[in-house]
Structure formats: C-alpha cells, structure tokens
Image: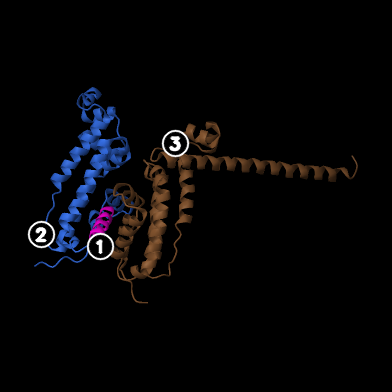
Chain colours: A brown, B blue
Amino acid sequence: MSAAEPAVIEAILAKDSISKSVRVDGRRLRSERTRQLIIEAYLALASEESPVLPTAAKVAERAGYSVRSVFERFPDLHGLQIAAADYAITQVVAMAASRDVGGGRMVRIRSHVNTRARTSERWLPLWRALIANQGSSGELKARAHAMRERVLSLMEHMYAPELSTLSDVARRQTLIALEAIVDVESWARMREYFGLSDEEASAAWIQAIDRLLPPTPPE
Amino acid sequence: MEAFLALLRDTGTMPTAAQIAERAGYSVRSIFERFPDLNALRVATVDYQLAQAAALAPPRHVDGDRQTRIRSHVETRAGTCERGIALWRVFLFTVEESKELKLRLSIARQRTIDRFEVMYRSELATLGEVEHKYLLIALEALTVMESWARMREMYGMSFEEGCAVWIRAIDRMLPPATPKK
C-alpha cells in the first residue's frame, strides 16, 4: 500500500458515507412523502364520508399504497386519526388568523364572523369525523379542548376593548357564551337545519355578537 | 329503554343488544320481541326522553319579571341538558341513518325555540321579523346540549356557574321588554 493510499481510502469512504447519507435522506424523504399522502387520503375520505371514519383499506387505496404501508407509518387507525387531526388543525389555525384587530367594533365583528364562517364551512366535515367523533380518546379530547381554547383566545384578542370593561368572571362568561354561538355546529345548524344562506347565517352571528358584547369604551 | 339509557350514561357509546339485555336482566330475544331492531329501540327511547323532558320541564314563571323568567328558563333548560346529554350524543351520531330520528331531532329543536318564544314574548315582540328569527337561532345555539356539556366537562363549571353563563348571555342578548299597558 502506497503512502497515498490511506488518503484515497478516506476519500472513498467519505464519498461512500455522503452517498449513503443522501440515500438515507432520500429514503426518509420518500417515507415522509408517503406518510403525508396517507394523511391527505385519510382527510379526503373523512371529509367525504363524515362523520364515518375511513377504513385502512380505503385509505390505502386512495393514497395508492398497500395497507401494510399505512401500518408501517402509523401504529393503528387511531394513530392515523390523531396525525390527520393535527395536520388539519394546523391548516385551520393558519386560516383562522385574526384580521382587522385595530378596527372599529363593527369592522372587527364582521371580520371575525367572516373568518369564522369560512373556517366552519371548510372544517365542519372534518370536525365531525375527527374531533367530535372522539369516543374515549384522551388525545382527541385534548385537541378539541385546545381548539376551543384557541377560539376563546382569538376572541379575547379581537374584542379586547369591549371585554376590558368586564370583571374577570364576566369576561370568561362572555367568552364561553360567544364560543357556543360561533361553534362549528352552530354554523352547520344555520346552514343545514334553518336553511340560511351564507350571508344570512353571517348576519345572524354578527347580530348575536353585537348584542352579547358590552358597549365599546371610548378611546 | 331504561337499561339502554343507563348504559349510554355509563359508557357514552351505543351499547349492543347483548349489553342492553344483560343490564335489563332479560334475554336478547326479549329485546327483539319488543323492538324489531336497535334503531326502533333508539327511536322509542328518544320518544320516552322527549316525553320525560316535557313532563319534568314545563315553562315556569312565564309572567314573572325579566330576571325571574331568565333564571327559571335557564335552570329548567340546564336540568334537561344534564339529564339528556348521553342520549343526545348517540342520537346525533346516528341521526343520519334514520328518518324517524331526524324527525325527533327537529321536534326537540323546535321545542327549544318555542320555549324561548313563550318565556321572552314581551322582549321578542319588540323586534322585526328577521331580527327576531336571528336572535332565536343565536339563543338556541347558546343553549344546545353540547354547550352545556362543554361548560360542565371541558371548562369544569358547576351547575350554578354554567347557569350564570347562560343567564348573563341571555340577558345581554334580549332587547328591553315592551312596556306593559
């Protein structure tokens, strides 16, 4: 072996290790991509068949993989349901960011209702399938609770001037009542049961929030 | 039916015929001698609960002052929610499967709305038709069974604290009453 050989071997080994790490990363990326496609297939089916949850066979078929691939990435269907709920929640949270926070009372109410209505319209089938259909799952209950606390916190931010005039107890009571009124299922009842159009349902929420909130204090 | 309701309260899920039979102390055959299938048992149980709710929760203090009427209405509604939530949850998840259950859901909602009309006649009379309709829809949303269940289970409120949330909200949302002539 010449003196140059160890360096060559090192270089070869380094090259080999780089190509191995590229291969491993590529494999990991493909696996992540498969996982993501399975979640998206699950969400599409859950939305179409809400509130009935999809079977592993249907998810696999929709995603274009085998049932085995599904269970290589998720321990069971409940694990997949939780992963799908987390992914959907991330999307809903991004959709529901507050706007017009510095506007006047009616501007804020309209903006909040508009965002909440869009979110409800889009989120309803998944909400029914993934979150409301939680059975005895502690993980799903925790997510449902977190989502509701988030809605409370968004409204606290949106209606800070009005809520600042109330005591702590009255503020919490008002927020809980507001949350019941703008619940996803409340939107669904207005649209499906009372037969209101999008505009009429939004008008009902605007009127209710305006009535429920205390007067806006002078600036 | 009482065994079915008891199991719903205990487990929160739709029981099987075998579980119902065991709890009632009869055979599975006895169940199907009285109900053609489990949907018929569900429908009969919902009817039983609707009748019970009507009997246990008649409108009270209809002619009282505003605060008396709100308190009376809220306490009655809260009692109905407290008793009915277990069945309601199973009911909501199976309602799409049955025309009979859909009809009963509609009856239950209409009763809630009718109660608001009876209790707050003088306040609602001051509103135009659309405003009146929207307010009833919002009040119904406020006082649905799940809203009560969330206050009790998720926010950890006592019966009185839950009532206080509804009393405050209804009082704020209702307009002033028509002055009596």
Left or right: residue B83 compared with residue A140: left
- Magenta region includes residue B55: no
- Disc on res. B63: 2
Q: Earlier in the sequence, mark 2 or mark 1?
A: 2
Please give the residue where the numbered disc 3 appears in the rendered image: A54
- The residue depicted at 66 percent of the width and 44 percent of the height is A25
- Per the image, the residue denoted by label 1 is B173
Name the main secondary structure of what is drawn in magenta.
helix
Say which chain tag 1 marks.
B
Q: Amino acid at mark 1?
A: Met
- Residue type at numbered disc 2: Asp
- Chain hosting mark 3: A
**Which range of residues does the magenta coloring cover?**
B128-141
Q: Identify the element where label 2 is drawn.
A: loop
Q: Is residue B177 left or right of residue A146?
A: left
Looking at the image, which residue is at 27% across and 42% down? B88
A102 on left or right of B100? right
Spatial separation of the CA atoms under disc 2 and disc 3:
52 Å
Give the Cα separation between the discs numbered 3 and 1: 41 Å
